[in-house]
Amino acid sequence: MIIRPAGLLLQQQRLLTMRYRYGSHDRFNLPGGNLEAEETLPAGLEREFREELGIQVAVGDLLFCAETFAAGRHTIHLLFPVTLLQGRPALVPAATRASELVWIPLAQLAEAPLYPNLGPALAAALQGNPPGVRYLGQLQQEWFA
């Protein structure tokens, strides 16, 4: 199982995505990636934005949780809104295979080939119908210490 936090960076009514080519199809991935050992979801997402896009972000509360299954791989996607704190997004070629950054207008999200495929749900949430989910962060469990 893979746990993949991803960030929703909005500017001027557009969502930041990263274009990837899979076979003969373009897909627009939400920035994010896999966690490292003992890394919290927000820390992993901050690191991915720093490494792949050269920017510093603040991570907000969890907005979506979704799952995908492909080629024997189970991925749990955790989507967080992020706020740009420092820098201007630009691909760092040594850290990603994405071909370019694409800002997708919010009005086009429902039809966009996003990964993960949550365009319609995201469009609804950004129009004032957010789901009722909240990320509680890392919990201290004394019997696990």
Image (spheres, rainbow, N blue to C red):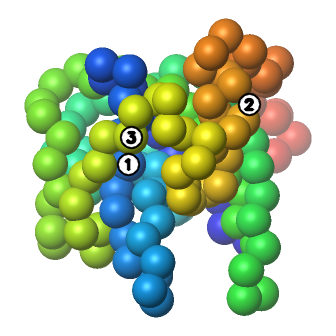
Alpha-carbon distance for marks 2 and 3?
A: 39 Å
Alpha-carbon distance for marks 3 and 1?
A: 7 Å
Question: Quick one: 134 or 40, which is closer to the camera?
Answer: 134
Q: Badge 2 local density, few (<14 within 10 Å), some, or many (20+)?
A: few
Nearer to us: label 2 or label 3: 3
Q: Is residue 116 above or below residue 104?
A: below
Q: Which residue is mark 2?
A: 140
Question: Quick one: 50 or 125, which is closer to the camera?
Answer: 125
Hey, what amino acid is under mark 1? Answer: Thr
Locate the N terminus and report the quarter of the image it occupies. Answer: bottom right
Q: Are marks 3 and 1 in contact (CB under 8 Å)?
A: yes
91 displayed left or right of 9? left
Residue 104, disc: 3
Residue 94, quarter of the rendered image: bottom left
Residue at (78%, 58%) from the top-left corner? 67
Residue at (38%, 48%) from the top-left corner? 17
Alpha-carbon distance for marks 1 and 2?
A: 34 Å
Residue at (72%, 57%) from the top-left corner? 76
